[in-house]
Image (tube, rainbow, N blue to C red):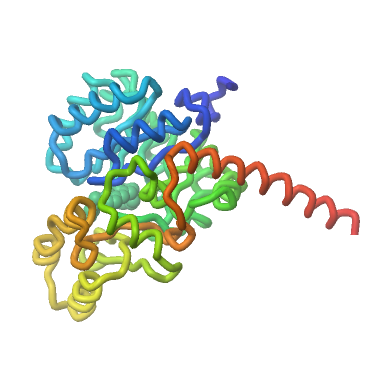
Amino acid sequence: MADCTDDIGGLLGIRYPIIQGGMAWIADSSLASAVSNGGGLGLIAAGNADADFVREEIRRTRVLTDKPFGVNVMLLNPHVDAIMNMLCTERPAVVTTGAGNPGKYMAALKDAGIKVIPVVASVALSVRLARAGADAVVAEGQEAGGHIGEATTMALVPQVTSAVDIPVIAAGGIGDGRGAAAAFMLGAKGLQVGTRFLVARECTISQAYKDMILKAKDTDTTVTGKSTGHPVRVLKNRMTKEILSLEGSGGISPEEFEQRMAGTLRAAVKDGDVTYGSVMSGQIAGLVRKEQTAAEIIEEIFKEVKDVYESRASVCGARRSI
Ligand code: TUI
C-alpha cells in the first residue's frame, strides 16, 4: 500500500478507504471489529456514554480484532473531557468527532499518537481544524442520518477539498459503489458509510430498526430538531409526525423538545420501539435492501467502484470519438 499522506488507506493502515459512521448507541465493539476485520476502519461511538463504558468497548474491540479501529466522540456528550482523557491513555488508532469543534482536544490526542479526523458540515470548520492539525476531515452532507448540517454532500465535498490540503473523507448519502465513485470524483480520498452498516449482520440493533431501514423509500426520512438548532435526520414515524407538528406551530420549547426526545434513540436501537423511537437514518436507506456481513458490504462497494470506473471510462471514450 502506498505510504502517502493523502492516501487514507496508508494514513490509517487499512485495506479499503472506508470508515464506518460513529452512530450513537449503535456503533459498538461488534460492528466496529467487523468493519475493521473487513478491511475498513470500524468506529465505536461514545454517543452520550461515560468514559468507563467507552473504555470497556475499546477493550472488547481489541479482543475481537487486531486491526486499527477508532472512537467517535459526540462533542455534546456531558462526559466529553473525561472521555478525551481516557482516550489519550487507551490510544485507539483514530478519534473522529461530531456535533462540534474538537479544537481544544487536538494537541493532547495528537501527542498521544492518535489520528484526529473531525466530522465537519462546513468549509469554515474544516479550514480551522486543518490549521489546528487534523489528520483528515470527514465532510458530511445533510443526506446523512443523525445530527446534520445544511450543505449537501455534492456541494460540500468539492468545496472542502478545495479549501484544505489534508485528505477529505466524504459522508452523507453514500450507500453503494456508485455513490462511492461519485465521492472520489468530487475529490474525496475516502468514504464514511453509516446507514448501510445499520443492516450489517454484526450490527446489534433491534430487528425492528433493521426492518424499517430495509423497507424505507427515498422519501421516508425527515428532520426533527430544527427549532432547537440540532437538526437530526430520522425515518418518519408517529413520533416525528407529532414532534414536527409541535415544532412547526411553535408549540414546544427547546427544553421541552430535549426532554421529550431523551431516550428515544435508545428506545429504537435497544427496545425496537420504531413507533415512538428516533430511527436515525440517512436518505440512502431506500437503496439498502439486504442484510450482509460488514466484510461483504465493503467488498461489494469496492467491486462496484471498479465496475463504475471501467464502464464510465468507456462512455467517455465513445463520446470523444463521435
Ligand atoms: O455528529 C454527527 N451525527 C450525529 S451526533 C448524534 S447524537 C445527537 N443527538 C441529538 C442531537 C445532537 C446529537 C447523532 N448523529 N455528525 C457529524 C456532524 N457534525 N454533523 C454536523 C456536525 C456539526 C455541526 C455543527 C459539527 C460542528 C458544528 O459546529 C461547530 C462549531 O463550533 O462551529
**Identity of the residue drawn at 90% across and 59% down:** 322
Task: Choose top left, top right, bottom left or bottom right for residue 145.
Answer: bottom left
In the image, residue 287 above or below residue 90? below
Give how far across and how far down residue 65 sits, in percent: 35, 24
The quadrant in which the N terminus is found is: top right
**Identity of the residue drawn at 43% across and 68% down:** 217
Return the residue found at the far right: 321
Could you tell me if residue 111 is visible in this image? Answer: yes
Give how far across and how far down residue 62 sits, in percent: 29, 22
Viewer-side residue, 291 vs 153: 291
Give how far across and how far down residue 223 sits, in percent: 31, 66
Viewer-side residue, 55 vs 267: 267
**Identity of the residue drawn at 26% across and 38% down:** 73
Could you tell whether 172 is left or right of 25 in the image? right
Task: Choose top left, top right, bottom left or bottom right for residue 234.
Answer: bottom left
In the image, residue 94 above or below residue 269? above
How many numbered marks have been drawn onto this rendered protein structure?
0
Give how far across and how far down residue 255 sits, in percent: 10, 63
Could you tell whether 224 is left or right of 291 in the image? left
Return the residue found at the far bottom: 249
Could you tell me if residue 147 is visible in this image? Answer: no
Could you tell whether 152 is left or right of 85 in the image? right
